[in-house]
């Protein structure tokens, strides 16, 4: 089973992501921000990271940079959850090594489509 | 998403939003006290932002829209473009109330009291230079006026660093596949040599032909994330209708099968036409020729039928092929009548030319080549009026249907005659039934529903008869005969159903790629049965293991167990050998498949050169591995061309030297000691050894002294040196600079050898020795610094041990005299940068293949092994110093050396 980490400071968004992904057969690990995400890696294999950009503590871009510097997660797809007003952030994220993005708000099927776009 | 999940999400959002609103209240009040505090502005902003984002995701569209307005205001405040005023704070607090009201409302999408005032107040605060897009509103995509289905060519060239963005290009290809029917071609030519390969870089690129209804926009969207990491070009293919029809409607498997079958018929046409040239009155050849042409016409018609409504342009190769076959058929038909004129030479030439044209078209269709154009004079000779729609797709498929149907009817009538004679046999009934099923599927295909009923009722009668053990009452017989009659009337009566044949779409995975080697193989049924037998034995042998296990568990005596294990092992290993032999046998094809192209080649060559040549083929049944057969063709063509062009004299010269006027060229294949030998033998003038020596001296291959010391036989072998041609003039046929050295290299690549024997005035014989199979080979397992390698036995001339003191260093090269000859020595350890062991004695394998000769030093020669060599895949295939890798009995992987290349590695590095 593919393991996905969902990183967002909003529990309800995390829940929506988790419910959607779990109903599609993925295993989901939740984290509330970048720092929490790093502490929950535990050297495990992850197939995808879905991270919010704006978060207290460590933000999404910082997290992307950190993950890309770790050999285990160097090539794992990272999708940023952004809002339409964050075009510039999107570019920053891409430069930090993000794979793609999904614009909030999104419908569950959009989320699944994006997940399938970046992960086999 | 189930309703339950949505409800749970909404509930959890409500709870979260209420908390956030409290946080927002607190933050707003704190901000009112300290309007200059940036952190507080951020706190407010983030809280509103989260409410909006999560709300929209949980399905609270109205709430998100309200939150958006106030978010916008605080975003401006965050950027310092809007002052934190009492009005702003007021708006924030009022929005909190409105949001709470929405959350508590029965219908969260309805307007709440107080909403309007807030929104007006905010509108006054926030300057609106231009109307901005509403959040979440879907952007209208202007519908491009693309045709329903279009064929695109997409070239995706990822930048080398693509993988660093976590992108897997395969997912992009998968997504293209979802859009429609994709034919994907992967380009590997940019993959560098192993030593230059950066494992984290992407070197592959892709070319995709896609037939889709979704338009260019959808394709662009696939590449949304990789715009900066990939060069992507999307192009609408020029010849839309043909591309859509061909790529979209015919599954690649049927296209391949069609090509294979047509190829076979084309070969028959050639053989039979040549036979007719020798014996104009052969009814048999004419009939076979006619049948082959007819089959091509029929197959093409069926394929055109499959394309259905989608029309191909008349210049497309497929309809052209149908036209040609039809025209040729009409040309041949009159000759089939009793007492008709025999087929004369001009007609044979016309048949052969048409055959070649059909071959060209077929290659166009199969995508093997492009741009074959029908020679206009051929169309004229065949009396084809261009753009003639006599053979348009519908008529073609209809005529194919009629052919099938008529054949079926003939079968029925024969069977009925048999049945009328009294006791019907089961076999007759079966034949009848098969015929009916063929007719049924053909009728279904052609949508001839009018035939359905008669076929069905006949099937019912036969079914009952077969069940009751072959009993057929005379009433049943009559009914069958009536049904048959009515079917004939319906088939012969012209009115076709005007329903256009439905387009058949099928998932196509692969493009009709790799044109060079066909991927299908036709197997002799006997071979397949042998394989099945062996598999059966394997299943039986497998059954002895559970017995063994139960014996072990029961604590049976170890001696008994060991004996049983040995027996089982022996029987399994016997089966494994048999299995290997059976599978190998499947890959074996008769040499005939290659030889059969020579009659035509020799005929054309001889005519062209004004010579008379009699070609004799022997041992056509000799079998060779498919891969070898596919690659031996070109070298053989070269040898045959040389023989006809240079070897055989013209009639006048032959008469003068007392030979029969017609030259004789013999192609003979046979088995010898596990190898296949192919001889190309002519009775021509033989080689001019002196001329060869002169050329070799001129080109600096040998010294004049060496030349004069050479025997005739040795001098003949000079012909294999690169760039040596004794032909005085370049003829149309040969002498274009592709020399015998290329032939020899080709044969070496197949792990074979070629030799030449010539006798002045009497002729030249080339003998080619080939392994029967490339897959299993014998080799020597050898060791260097603790690493094991396999050296193929074919390359080894000798294996010796010499004292280390006998090896001398000369200009940085180690040399030694082995059995009277001097060889350079290369050490395996040095080649692969392994720590060298110094030994008092050197173990040397002498490699000698004529051009490449040296001694290979290893630490130890372990044993002779028989291995299955797997070619190296991916970037490793560029490592020419290895043939491949083999898996040993215990699972270890050992690299198989290519001795003809591996000394080069050493040579280049020592430079």
Image: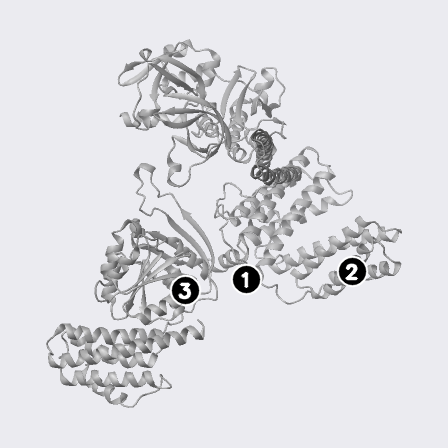
Residue at horizontal 73 percent and vertical 63 percent from the top: B451
Depth check: B84 or B139 in front?
B84
Q: Is residue B375 above or below residue B723?
A: below
**Chain letter for mark 3:** A
Identify residue for label 1.
Answer: B310
> Are the residues flagged by discs 2 and 1 in contact, CB closer than 8 Å?
no
CA distance for labels 3 and 2: 56 Å
Identify residue for label 2.
Answer: B458
Depth check: B754 or B230 in front?
B230
**Chain letter for mark 1:** B
Tell me the SS state at disc 2. helix
Residue at horizontal 79 percent and vertical 54 percent from the top: B412
Question: Toward which corner of the image does residue B834 lie, by quadrant?
Answer: top left
**Chain letter for mark 2:** B
Circle 1 crowding by C-alpha within 10 Å: few under 14, some 14–19, many from 20: some
B740 vs B680, left or right, is left
Question: Toward which corner of the image does residue B385 lie, by quadrant?
Answer: bottom right
Identify residue for label 3.
Answer: A22
CA distance for labels 3 and 1: 44 Å
Q: Quadrant of the N terminus of chain B?
A: bottom left
Circle 2 crowding by C-alpha within 10 Å: few under 14, some 14–19, many from 20: many
Please identify, in this view, whether the residue under mark 2 or under mark 1 is nearer the observer.
2
Please identify, in this view, whether the residue under mark 3 or under mark 2 is nearer the observer.
3
A89 vs B647, left or right, is left
Q: How many marks overall? A: 3
């Amino acid at each position: 089973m593919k393991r996905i980490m969902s990183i967002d400071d909003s529990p309800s968004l995390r829940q929506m992501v988790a419910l959607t992904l779990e109903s599609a057969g993925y295993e989901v690990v939740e984290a509330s921000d970048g720092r929490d995400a790093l502490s929950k890696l535990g050297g495990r294999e992850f197939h995808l990271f879905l991270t919010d950009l704006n978060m207290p503590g460590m933000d999404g871009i910082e997290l992307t940079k950190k993950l890309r510097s770790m050999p285990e997660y160097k090539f794992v797809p990272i999708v940023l959850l952004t809002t339409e007003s964050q075009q510039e952030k999107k570019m920053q994220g891409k430069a930090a090594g993000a794979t793609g993005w999904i614009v909030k708000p999104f419908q569950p099927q959009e989320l699944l489509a994006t997940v399938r776009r970046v992960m086999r | 998403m189930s309703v339950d999940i949505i409800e749970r999400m909404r509930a959890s959002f409500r709870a979260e939003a209420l908390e956030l609103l409290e946080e927002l209240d607190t933050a707003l009040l704190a901000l009112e006290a300290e309007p200059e505090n940036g952190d507080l502005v951020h706190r407010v902003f983030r809280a509103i932002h989260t409410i909006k984002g999560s709300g929209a995701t949980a399905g609270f569209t109205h709430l998100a829209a309200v939150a958006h307005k106030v978010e916008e205001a605080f975003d401006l405040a965050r950027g310092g473009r809007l002052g934190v005023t009492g009005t702003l704070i007021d708006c924030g607090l009022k929005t909190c109330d409105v949001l709470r009201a929405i959350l508590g409302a029965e219908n969260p999408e309805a307007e709440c009291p107080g909403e309007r005032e807030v929104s007006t107040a905010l509108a006054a605060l926030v300057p609106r230079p231009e109307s901005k897009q509403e959040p979440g509103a879907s952007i209208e995509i202007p519908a491009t006026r693309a045709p329903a289905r279009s064929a695109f060519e997409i070239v995706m060239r990822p930048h080398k660093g693509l993988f660093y963005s976590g992108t897997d290009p395969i997912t992009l290809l998968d997504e293209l596949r979802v859009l429609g029917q994709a034919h994907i071609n992967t380009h590997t030519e940019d993959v560098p040599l192993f030593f230059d390969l950066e494992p984290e870089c992407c070197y592959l690129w892709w070319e995709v032909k896609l037939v889709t209804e979704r338009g260019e926009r959808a394709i662009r969207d696939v590449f949304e994330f990789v715009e900066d990491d990939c060069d992507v070009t999307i192009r609408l293919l020029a010849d839309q209708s043909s591309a859509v029809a061909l790529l979209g409607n015919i599954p690649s498997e049927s296209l391949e099968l069609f090509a294979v079958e047509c190829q076979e018929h084309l070969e028959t046409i050639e053989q039979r036409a040549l036979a007719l040239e020798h014996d104009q009155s052969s009814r048999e050849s004419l009939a076979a020729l006619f049948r082959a042409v007819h089959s091509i016409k029929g197959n093409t018609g069926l394929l055109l039928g499959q394309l259905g409504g989608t029309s191909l342009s008349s210049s497309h190769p497929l309809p052209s092929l149908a036209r040609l076959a039809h025209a040729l058929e009409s040309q041949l038909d009159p000759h089939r009548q009793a007492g008709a004129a025999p087929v004369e030479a001009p007609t044979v030439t016309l048949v052969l030319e048409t055959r070649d044209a059909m071959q060209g078209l077929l290659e166009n269709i199969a995508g093997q080549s492009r741009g074959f154009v029908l020679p206009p004079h051929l169309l004229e000779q065949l009396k084809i009026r261009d753009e003639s729609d006599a053979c348009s797709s519908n008529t073609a498929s209809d005529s194919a249907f009629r052919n099938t149907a008529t054949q079926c009817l003939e079968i029925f009538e024969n069977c009925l005659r048999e049945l009328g004679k009294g006791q019907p046999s089961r076999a007759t009934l079966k034949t009848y039934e098969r015929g009916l099923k063929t007719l049924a599927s053909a009728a279904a295909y052609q949508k001839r529903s009018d035939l359905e009923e008669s076929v069905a009722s006949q099937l019912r009668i036969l079914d009952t008869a077969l069940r009751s053990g072959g009993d057929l009452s005379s009433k049943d017989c009559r009914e069958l005969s009536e049904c048959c009659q009515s079917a004939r009337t319906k088939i012969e009566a012209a009115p076709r159903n005007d329903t256009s044949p439905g387009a058949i779409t099928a998932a196509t995975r692969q493009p009709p790629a790799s044109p060079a080697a066909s991927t299908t193989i036709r197997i002799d049924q006997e071979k397949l049965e042998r394989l099945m037998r062996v598999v059966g034995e394997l299943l039986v042998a497998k059954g002895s293991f559970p017995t063994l296990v139960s014996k072990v568990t029961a604590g049976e005596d170890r001696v008994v167990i060991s004996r049983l294990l040995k027996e089982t092992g022996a029987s399994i290993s016997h089966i494994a050998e048999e299995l290997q032999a059976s599978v190998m046998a499947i890959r074996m094809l008769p040499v005939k498949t290659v030889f059969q192209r020579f009659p035509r080649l020799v005929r054309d060559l001889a005519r062209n050169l004004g010579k008379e040549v009699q070609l004799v083929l022997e041992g056509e049944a000799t079998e060779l591995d498919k891969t070898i057969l596919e690659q031996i063709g070109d070298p053989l063509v070269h040898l045959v061309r040389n023989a006809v062009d240079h070897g055989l004299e013209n009639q006048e010269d032959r008469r003068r030297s007392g030979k029969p006027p017609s030259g004789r060229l013999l192609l003979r294949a046979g088995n010898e000691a596990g190898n296949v030998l192919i001889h190309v033998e002519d009775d021509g003038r033989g080689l001019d050894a002196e001329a060869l020596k002169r050329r070799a001296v001129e080109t600096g291959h040998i010294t004049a002294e060496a030349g004069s010391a050479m025997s005739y036989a040795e001098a003949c072998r000079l012909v294999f040196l690169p760039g040596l041609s004794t032909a005085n003039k370049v003829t149309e046929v040969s002498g274009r600079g592709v020399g015998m050295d290329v032939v020899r290299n080709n044969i070496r690549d197949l792990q074979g050898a070629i030799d030449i024997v010539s006798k002045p005035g009497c002729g030249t014989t080339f003998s080619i020795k080939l392994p029967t199979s490339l897959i299993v080979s014998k080799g020597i397992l050898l060791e260097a610094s603790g690493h094991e390698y396999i050296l193929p036995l074919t390359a080894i001339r000798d294996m010796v041990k010499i004292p280390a003191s006998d090896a001398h260093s000369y200009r940085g090269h180690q040399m030694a005299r082995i059995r009277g000859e001097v060889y350079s020595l290369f050490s395996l350890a040095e080649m692969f940068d392994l720590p060298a062991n110094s030994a008092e004695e050197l173990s040397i394998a002498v490699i000698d293949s004529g051009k490449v000769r040296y001694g290979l030093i290893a630490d130890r020669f372990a044993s002779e092994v028989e291995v299955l060599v797997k070619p190296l895949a991916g970037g490793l295939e560029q490592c020419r110093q290895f043939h491949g890798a083999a898996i040993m009995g215990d699972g270890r992987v050992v690299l198989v050396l290519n001795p003809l290349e591996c000394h080069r590695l050493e040579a280049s590095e020592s430079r």
